[in-house]
Image: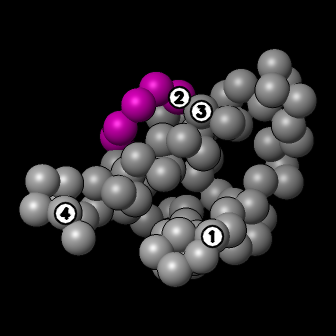
Amino acid sequence: MSDVAQWPVQCHEAKAAIRFLRANAGALGLNPDRLIAAGMSAGAHMACILGVSSDHAQLNGELGEHLEESTEVMGS
């Protein structure tokens, strides 16, 4: 637990990463329609949050660029 980065900033950071991957999928050789989230322990918790919150404005946040990109993942 961090007393510096309070929830939901961790979710905002993860969703900013998803938007980055979607926006740069071509250059990175990714299929933006097949992104998943996975992890262990705290990472698994975040993957579950990402899996169920793609349309939740408060959890999507406004961090990073590419705010027009979806934060939806196809599996978690």
Q: Earlier in the sequence, mark 3 or mark 4?
A: 4
Report the residue marked by disc 4. Answer: 2
Is disc 2 in contact with disc 1, using a CB cutoff of under 8 Å?
Answer: no
Task: Give the spatial CA distance, label 2 vs label 3.
Answer: 7 Å
Dot 4: within a 10 Å radius of its alpha carbon, few (fewer than 14), some, or many (20 or more) residues?
Answer: few
Q: Relative to 39, does residue 57 appear above or below in the rendering?
A: above
Mark 3, mark 1: which one is toward the viewer? 1
Dot 1: within a 10 Å radius of its alpha carbon, few (fewer than 14), some, or many (20 or more) residues?
Answer: few
Query: In the figure, residue 18 lies in which quadrant?
Result: top right
Query: In the figure, residue 68 lies in which quadrant?
Result: top right
Report the residue marked by disc 3. Answer: 20
Dot 3: within a 10 Å radius of its alpha carbon, few (fewer than 14), some, or many (20 or more) residues?
Answer: some
Give the image location of residue 3, x and y in percent. 10, 62
SS for callout 2 = loop
Q: Relative to 52, does residue 71 appear above or below in the rendering?
A: above
Mark 2, mark 3: which one is toward the viewer? 3
- Report the amino acid beneath label 3: Phe
The disc placed on residue 39 is: 1
Q: Relative to 14, does residue 55 appear above or below in the rendering?
A: below
Q: Earlier in the sequence, mark 4 or mark 2?
A: 4
Q: In this view, does 44 lie to the left or right of 5?
A: right
Q: In this view, does 36 lie to the left or right of 11?
A: right
| Numbered range of the magenta stretch | 62-66
- Report the amino acid beneath label 1: Gly
- Report the amino acid beneath label 4: Ser
Give the image location of residue 73, x and y in percent. 69, 60
- Report the amino acid beneath label 2: His
Report the residue marked by disc 2. Answer: 66
